[in-house]
Image (cartoon, helix red, strand yellow):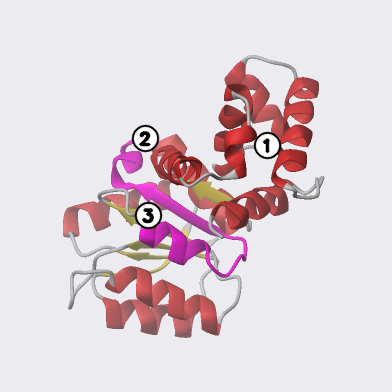
Amino acid sequence: MRVVVAEDLFLLRDGLVRLLEAHDFQLAAAVDNGPELTRALAELKPDVAVVDVRLPPSFTDEGLQCALQARREQPGLPVLVLSQHVEQLYARELLADGNGGVGYLLKDRVFDADQFVDAVRRVASGGTAMDPQVIQQLLAQRSSQGSPLEKLTPREVEVIELMAQGRSNAAIAERLVVTERAVAKHTSNIFAKLGLPPSDDDNRRVLAVLAYLER
């Protein structure tokens, strides 16, 4: 699996490269600025890109904008964005096109090697990997605006948060210490309350929920 890494801090970039290579990823490129990232994504067409939001020369949202532009030119390009803080605007922009293969993690998650590598693989396979803190803020925002999310029970909110992170029914059941049948029932109720058709495709159902949250 070929990956492009974009991070301006040398030590973190080197750490990401070593971590990914240790888990059998093939490094296509490791860059430290926006123009090089744009060039690498266009020329190398990796299986997944791991991108810091803030890159030179602007140090604002250069990395995110480069990734979004690459996704417009290569629809469905898997991108996992790393950020120091939760920025709801960044999450909304990343999810706006409704395509799979997207992730938004806080940089703190990098220190949990298994969690981070799992997120990269999930995004590369077309899934979604959203940081729990991002999901909680999106849910809280929608709830405060009178969203249909208010119809969900506390347990259903827990389920939808885990769904939005890209977890399967089996993984949700394990996390909540319930049966898969119970999770399936909660999932069915969630889709019904949100007016979304249920689907057996985990990635599509997660994207549908996220798309609804971002309308």
Q: Considering the numbered disc 1 on the image, is that residue within a helix, a strand or a loop?
A: loop
Residue 134 x/y as whole percent: 41, 45
Q: How far is the residue under mark 2 from the one under mark 1? A: 20 Å
Q: Earlier in the sequence, mark 2 or mark 3?
A: 3
Q: Which residue is mark 3?
A: 88
Query: Residue 144 vs residue 158: left or right?
Result: left
As drawn, 113 above or below 36: above
Q: Earlier in the sequence, mark 2 or mark 1?
A: 2
Q: Residue at x 43, y 53 (%)?
A: 104
As drawn, 180 above or below 25: above
Query: Does residue 202 appear in this view?
Result: yes
* Disc sitting over residue 141 in the figure: none
Neighbor class of circle 3 (other Cα within 10 Å; few <14, some 14-19, many 20+) is some
Q: Which kind of residue does numbered mark 2 sit on?
A: Asp
Please identify the residue farthest to the top as the structure is shown. Answer: 177
Query: Does residue 3 appear in this view?
Result: no
Query: Residue 109 vs residue 92: left or right?
Result: left
Q: Earlier in the sequence, mark 3 or mark 1?
A: 3
Residue 146 x/y as whole percent: 53, 44
Q: Quadrant of the N terminus?
A: bottom right
Neighbor class of circle 1 (other Cα within 10 Å; few <14, some 14-19, many 20+) is some
3 or 1: mark nearer the eye: 3
**Nearer to us in this view, 58 or 1:** 58
Q: Quadrant of the C terminus?
A: bottom right
Q: Which residue is mark 2?
A: 112
Q: Which residue is mark 1?
A: 168
Residue 53 x/y as whole percent: 30, 63
Q: Residue at x 73, y 26 (%)?
A: 183
What are the residue bounds of the magenta stretch? 89-111
The quarter of the picture where residue 49 lies is: bottom left
Q: How far is the residue under mark 3 from the one under mark 1? A: 24 Å
Q: Considering the numbered disc 2 on the image, is that residue within a helix, a strand or a loop?
A: loop
